[in-house]
Image (cartoon, rainbow, N blue to C red):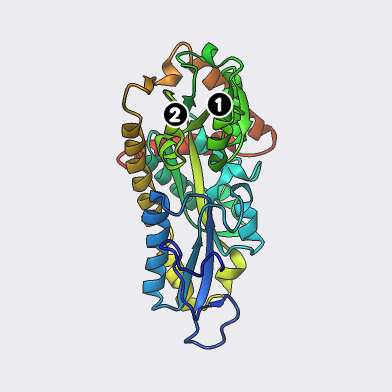
Amino acid sequence: MTLFSRRPRWAITAGAALLIGAAGSASAATTLRFAHFWPGGSAINEQVFQPWAEAVEKQSNGKLQVQIFPSQTLSKADQSYKATVNGLADITATAQGYTARCFPLTQIVELPGVSRSAPQGSCIAQKLYENNSDFAKEYRDSHVLFMFTTGQGFINTRETPVRKPEDLDGLRIRRPTAVVGEMLTSLGAQSVGMPAPQAYQAMQRGVIDGTTLPWEGMKTFRLNELAHYHTQMPLYTLTFVATMNKQAYERLPDDLKQVIDDNSGMKWANKAGEVFAAEDAAGRKQAQGPEHTIFDIDEPLDDPDWGPPLKKATEGYLEELEARGRPARQVYEQAMALSEDCAAG
């Protein structure tokens, strides 16, 4: 029995659908394979990706079918973007930071102080993509559908309470991207790179002492079961992109390209941001109780203990990109200006 023979709830497909390029008649459907790493039962899959697929299918009158592969079933999280560029998948939703050094300007949105919430961060990232050619150029090998972000990511540990940076000394903390890793290193931790789906097993086995994740990720990947201390110190915002294989898009007839275009951009960036925000609230609620301790540090950049190393790491990242000829300062300033414009989100 194949993975999709029972047509699970998250797999939206048509039995007579053909792969892209195989259909020669107007009545044949084109199947788009959509790969991502979130669980099939997650809110992100059920409330963002599945509705997106349904909207595309409905507007195309069934000419486009979307087959969703969650939980890394088509490609691993850190290979999803390349798998889509290379045509293994037609569409992916993934974290840019999982593809190291390919999206340095995008990852400026990750820096502390840029965004306070998933709706705000999603708005910032989408507007940067739409209005900054250097930012958009990072995606020249794929066809972007929409950008989105998590809410604020912070430090979650299993056994060690972290109130000040010195409490991180020697702790092995999972980081999602190299940019966040630099932040952790500046605070004294040992950063360990891995995608979110691997963090539960790593913490359970004692490979790591804690993880950086927003409340949404703690809930989605069940890490509230293991982590008992949560230092809600806005450390980063993780960026994501939903994007399509360029050739798969270009092979579509004009009317079906229009369907994809109509289901791209800020509308879906906003939708994703709203779902992440709701999941952040649910994740924090899940961590209430005597087995959990939450330390709130609302303004880390102004905090005498946390502020200096975070500011130093931010400046170091911008200087590194500028030394490589990237307009980092300009993108950072634009992101901070958009932070105000997007604050209502």
59 vs 331, left or right, is left
Residue in the picture at 44% in, 40% down: 150
Q: Which mark is residue 195?
A: none
The image quarter in which residue 303 lies: top left
Residue in the picture at 45% in, 49% down: 126
Q: Are marks 2 and 1 in contact (CB under 8 Å)?
A: yes
Number of numbered discs present?
2
* Crowd tier of the residue under label 1, counting other residues whose Cα lies within 10 Å: few below 14, some 14–19, many 20 or above: many
The residue singled out by tag 1 in the image is: 314
Q: Quadrant of the N terminus?
A: bottom right
Whether residue 57 is situated above or below residue 118 in the rendered picture:
below
Q: Which mark is residue 113?
A: 2
Report x, y in % for residue 55.
Answer: 37, 67
Whether residue 14 is situated above or below residue 329 in the rendered picture:
below
Report x, y in % for residue 174.
Answer: 57, 31
Q: Secondary structure at mark 1?
A: helix
Q: Is residue 330 visible?
A: no
